[in-house]
Image (tube, rainbow, N blue to C red):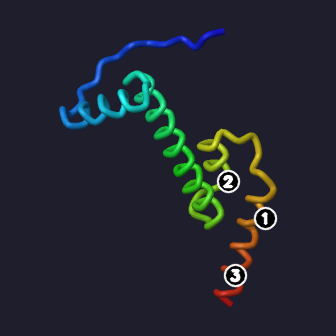
Amino acid sequence: MAKKEKTFLIRIEADLLKRLDRYSEKREYSKAEIIRIALESYIANMEEAEDKELIEQYINLRLEPKEFMKVMDFKSIPKDLQKARKEKLEEMKKVNK
């Protein structure tokens, strides 16, 4: 089954549009295809960076387990992350003695 596509308009600076035109001609891709690929890549990178930040917050005790599970859409927290958090907690206890 083909993915459902929708059309929307965007404003783009003239210089960026010229660069897109040149790139499109060189690579023999449509401008729309280049924009779709770039947008997919950008969103995937942003999601990955956000997930890494949330994991770091959880491990470093700045995010409670319930909240972490909610924002990450987990039914349970993976064992390796639980272990890393527990190790961090033990490390903090040693420092505070």
Q: Position of residue 85 (x, y in %)?
A: 71, 65
Left or right of residue 37: residue 60: right
**Residue farthest to the top?**
1
- In this view of the protein, which residue sits in the foreground, 33 or 43? 33
- Name the front one of labels 3 and 1: 1
The three-letter amino acid code for the residue at tag 3 is Lys
Secondary element under disc 2, as helix, strand or loop, is helix
* Relative vertical location of residue 74 with respect to residue 65 in this rendering, above or below: above
Who comes first in sequence, dot 2 or dot 1?
Answer: 2
Secondary element under disc 3, as helix, strand or loop, is helix
Who comes first in sequence, dot 3 or dot 2?
Answer: 2
Q: Position of residue 80 (x, y in %)?
A: 78, 59
| 3 and 2 marks in contact (CB < 8 Å) | no
Q: CA distance from mark 3 to mark 1?
A: 15 Å
Q: Quadrant of the N terminus?
A: top right
The three-letter amino acid code for the residue at tag 2 is Pro
Q: Which residue is mark 2?
A: 65
Q: Which residue is mark 3?
A: 93
Q: Which residue is mark 1?
A: 83
* Relative vertical location of residue 47 with respect to residue 9 in this rendering, above or below: below
Q: CA distance from mark 2 to mark 1?
A: 13 Å
User: Which residue: 40% across, 21% down?
Assistant: 30
Q: CA distance from mark 3 to mark 2?
A: 19 Å
How many marks the image carries: the answer is: 3
Q: Position of residue 93 (x, y in %)?
A: 70, 81
Q: Residues within 10 Å of mark 1 (few under 14, many from 20)?
A: few
Q: Residues within 10 Å of mark 2 (few under 14, many from 20)?
A: some
